[in-house]
Amino acid sequence: MVAVARHDTILRELELRGSLAITQLSKRLDVSAMTLRRDLAELESRGLLVRVHGGAVSTAVAKQQERGAGEAGGSVRRPVATIGMIAPTANYYFPQVVRGASDAARELNCRLVLGTTNYSEREELRQAERLIAGGVDALMITPHNGLVEGSALHELLIDAPVPIVIVERGVDERIAGRIESVRSDHAYGAELAVRHLAERGHRRIALAAREAATTPWLLDGYERTMARLGLGEHVLFRTLPTPEVGADSAIDALERFYDECVRNDVTAALMLGDVDSMAFADLVVEHGRRIPEDFALVAYDDEFSAFAAVPLTAVAPPKHDLGYAALRLCFDRIRQQDGGGHAVTRMSLLPTLVERESTRAS
């Protein structure tokens, strides 16, 4: 293999895994360890990698680890594992999930490789295929529509040679095999909100949400809690549209939801997510009603509910802890791969309720 081809292979390995070991790569490329050391020295002189004992790390990994090593007085370490993560978006909700995974990766000296899909099933499959074929040691993934039986993604993950952890999606026990999961218990989150509102004297409590993976869980928790509190006859659930950019359909739907609340003497609502909750709160005030005296409101997600004109009480899923726990589960499975079987883990983390002015008693 000529030097240019070897250099390309070395850089691709570092791009995916963040590190390489000379002994392993020399066997794969069928070249001597001395040849690879010369290659690494040349690439380091060009600022393309950092040599460490027994191999090299990418410049990105070296910078990340130097920050931690400088504080601890240590030296750069080669990552012990590469873990892939596929998220639907990096714009809302999932940045905190990614941050949790990143914090765990840093603590465990792992390399985290992230891809986003913009909720595209085709892109989910493409990225999963690429990361598994590229040699990640484990994969965390959030399928837009969950794990669908018989789909190409389902077949890929079921047969994957590495640990797979589904993040923030339900897993059908009948089709999941040994695929594991970590998710928020959104039904419990809805229960927190309904009980909080009921404790403040509200008996007619509505739920409104766009179509999302979270919505069925919220509806389940909402209906069950209303029934347990003897309020089942007052259940009111409405689906809100996901509008196109620049369209007025969202605010029109909120207007209709407000009118329906008035007709049914509803005095409180739980809404998914922050954008619709804040817009609805403004609408309530514009109609001359006071929050929380005349109408109480709980948002679900708590991305920026605190910044509403009337700061909104919100249910906060444990987003950071979710990513942190999922990566640690991947890491544990990597360590256990040569040590026999283990119990399959399907983990649910509980949301919390953050009380603010939109429900606070005066």
Image (spheres, rainbow, N blue to C red):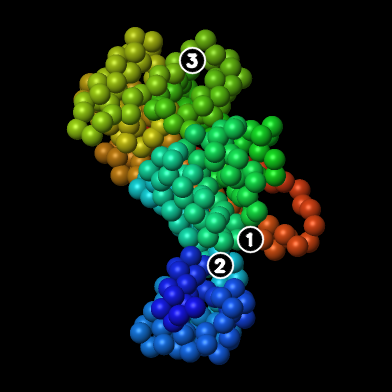
Q: Residue at x 54, y 29 (%)?
A: 217
* Amino acid type, label 1: Phe
* Amino acid type, label 3: Val
Q: Earlier in the sequence, mark 2 or mark 3?
A: 2
Q: Secondary structure at mark 3?
A: loop
Q: Is residue 199 visible?
A: no
224 is higher (above) or lower (below) than 32: above
Q: Which residue is mark 3?
A: 235
Q: State if disc 1 and disc 2 touch (CB < 8 Å).
A: yes
Q: Nearer the viewer, residue 76 or 267?
A: 76
Q: CA distance from mark 3 to mark 1?
A: 43 Å
Q: Which residue is mark 1?
A: 331
Q: Which residue is mark 2?
A: 110
* Amino acid type, label 2: Cys
Q: CA distance from mark 2 to mark 3?
A: 47 Å
272 is higher (above) or lower (below) than 203: below
Q: Residue at x 34, y 9 (%)?
A: 263
Q: Quadrant of residue 329?
A: bottom right
Q: Which mark is residue 27?
A: none
